[in-house]
């Protein structure tokens, strides 16, 4: 169960100590001394676990959890602090942290906790990759063709997918209207919500006109 562990702590000795302990377990580690440096490393490396101090010179480590999860949803975060409070612990978990440890307890707890976090991170990443494969089946990349008209239609569909505009697709049976509709949905801000296909022949013209044009 190999993976990269990013350690963020402004105390270089603690970074080095944690790094040695974790590398003995077969993991690769990266070190950062500020939140900004940590985020840059996170962007450029496939990090599975982040171990972050709460008191960083440029950002609160509890608040940093939210930024990390926003950037890499499958990355698990463990917060460490020398001065733990219940409020900080609750907020860290609420922001998406895997756990919250008080320094001093971490020597005995960090490795078992790291393995549990790594197991979850690996599972989350597999789910993330599976979602990408499933979603790629309904993307504009799957629409094959070189004609000018098709390229223009794809370009227009891509642009409209970013808006909240009602879209009417017209074409003969078998020309790919539903494929276009699925691709627009997948590229839209509503991609996480269900795509529902309906047979419109069952609706009255008045109802369809009201739905499409208001």
Image (cartoon, rainbow, N blue to C red):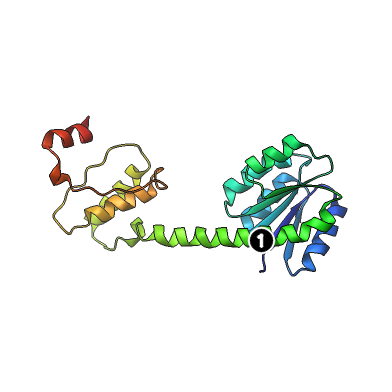
* Residue positioned 64% across, 59% down in the render: 48
**Label 1: how many Cα within 10 Å (few below 14, some 14–19, many 20+):** many
Where residue 22 sits in the image (x, y, percent)? 78, 63
Using residue 120 as the reference point, say whether residue 57 is left or right of it.
right
Residue 154 vs residue 57, the one in the foreground: 57
Quadrant assignment, res 207: top left
Residue at the far top: name it: 214
Where residue 94 sits in the image (x, y, percent)? 63, 40
Residue 54 vs residue 86, the one in the foreground: 86
Residue 207 vs residue 173, the one in the foreground: 207
Residue 48 vs 167, above or below: the answer is below
Where residue 113 sits in the image (x, y, percent)? 73, 57
Residue 195 vs residue 178, the one in the foreground: 195
Q: Disc 1 marks which residue?
A: 118
Q: Is residue 191 visible?
A: yes
Where residue 61 sits in the image (x, y, percent)? 73, 42
Q: Can residue 59 be seen in this view?
A: no
Considering the image in quadrants, where does the C terminus appear?
A: top left
Using residue 23 as the reference point, say whether residue 76 is left or right of it.
left
Using residue 149 as the reference point, say whether residue 111 is left or right of it.
right
Residue 168 vs 87, above or below: the answer is below
């Amino acid at each position: 169960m190999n993976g990269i562990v990013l350690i963020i702590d402004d105390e270089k000795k603690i970074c080095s100590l944690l790094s040695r302990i974790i590398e003995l377990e077969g993991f690769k580690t990266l070190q950062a001394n500020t939140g900004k440096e940590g985020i840059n490393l996170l962007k450029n490396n496939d990090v599975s676990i982040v171990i972050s101090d709460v008191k960083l010179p440029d950002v609160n480590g509890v608040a940093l959890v939210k930024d990390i999860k926003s950037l890499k949803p499958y990355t698990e975060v463990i917060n460490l602090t020398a001065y733990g409070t219940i409020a900080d612990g609750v907020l860290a978990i609420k922001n998406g942290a895997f756990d919250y440890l008080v320094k001093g307890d971490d020597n005995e707890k960090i490795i078992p906790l790291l393995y549990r976090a790594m197991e979850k991170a690996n599972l989350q990443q597999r789910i993330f990759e599976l979602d990408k494969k499933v979603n790629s089946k309904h993307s504009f990349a799957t629409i094959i063709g070189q004609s000018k008209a098709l390229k223009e239609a794809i370009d227009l569909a891509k642009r409209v997918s970013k808006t909240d505009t009602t879209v009417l697709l017209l074409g003969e049976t078998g020309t790919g209207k539903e494929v276009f509709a699925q691709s627009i949905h997948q590229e839209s801000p509503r991609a996480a919500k269900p795509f529902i296909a309906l047979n419109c022949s069952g609706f009255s013209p008045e109802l369809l006109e009201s739905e499409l044009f208001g």
